[in-house]
Amino acid sequence: MSKIRILLADDHGLVRKGLRLLIESQEGMEVVGEASDGREALKLAAELQPEIAILDIAMPNLNGIDAAAQLAKRGDNVRVIILSMHSDESYVVRALDAGARGYLLKDSAEEDLVQAIRTVAQGRPYFSPAISATLLEDYIRTLHQRGLTDTYDLLTDREKEVLQLLAEGKSNKEVAALLNLSPYTVETHRTNLMQKLNLHNTAEIVLYAVRKKIIA
């Protein structure tokens, strides 16, 4: 059984050492490289072809979010997990927009890192539990402030299915195959559910699904 190949990028050597020890204590995982800044991470990702890149959000030369965006633009087949001290929604949104598939708080990395790697390696997004709780609290507060109600129950059963699959990272084509629908029909469902929920892009679909605990 092949191991999950992982690249670590953090400007603190002690942090990298601790993460490496944690990862390599797990069966089926290996750290193939370490970087101390975002530019070195990009270089090593091209050379080593890891499956997972764990990027600190605040690194010199190139921060983790911008490095994630460049990896996505470059088309590297690597899934990014952002390590961060920040739990507020603006950072999570920026990370998702940059193509990150996971967002992990540093203070819970010891408890959550292994699960995050396994989940993201399977193609599903992962967020620290504290992030999910914060997103839900912020969402409820915003609804109350605006005098709005949650419109999830306006979705049809099929739209709810499509929402979950899109939030899990599936493409329209993959959703169509799973649900035995045409890509055109999936796009119609996607458009309808985004209008009903006032969502504008894939990042917002993922955030909504996390708030509603549709995905972990």
Image (cartoon, grey):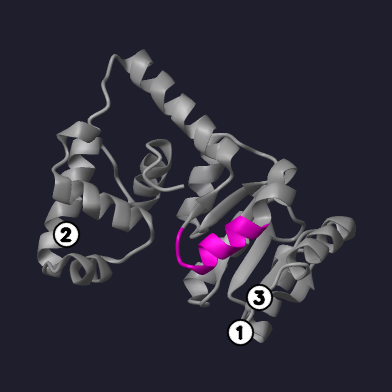
In the rendered image of this protein, does residue 138 appear above or below residue 101? above
Residue plotted at (24% across, 65% down)? 175
Q: Amino acid at mark 1?
A: Ser
Q: What is the secondary structure assignment of the residue under circle 2?
A: helix
Instruction: Name the residue: 39% across, 48% down.
Output: 206
Tag 2: amino acid? Glu
Q: Which mark is residue 187?
A: 2
Q: Is residue 115 magenta?
A: yes
Q: Residues within 10 Å of mark 2 (few under 14, many from 20)?
A: some
Where is mark 3, residue-wise? 28
Label whose residue precedes the other's in the sequence (3 or 2): 3
Residue 189 bears which disc, if any?
Answer: none
Please say if 109 is above or below 11: above
Q: Which residue is mark 1?
A: 2
Q: Residues in magenta?
A: 114-124
Can residue 112 be seen here?
yes
Residue closest to the eye, 26 or 23: 26
Residue 36 appears in view: no
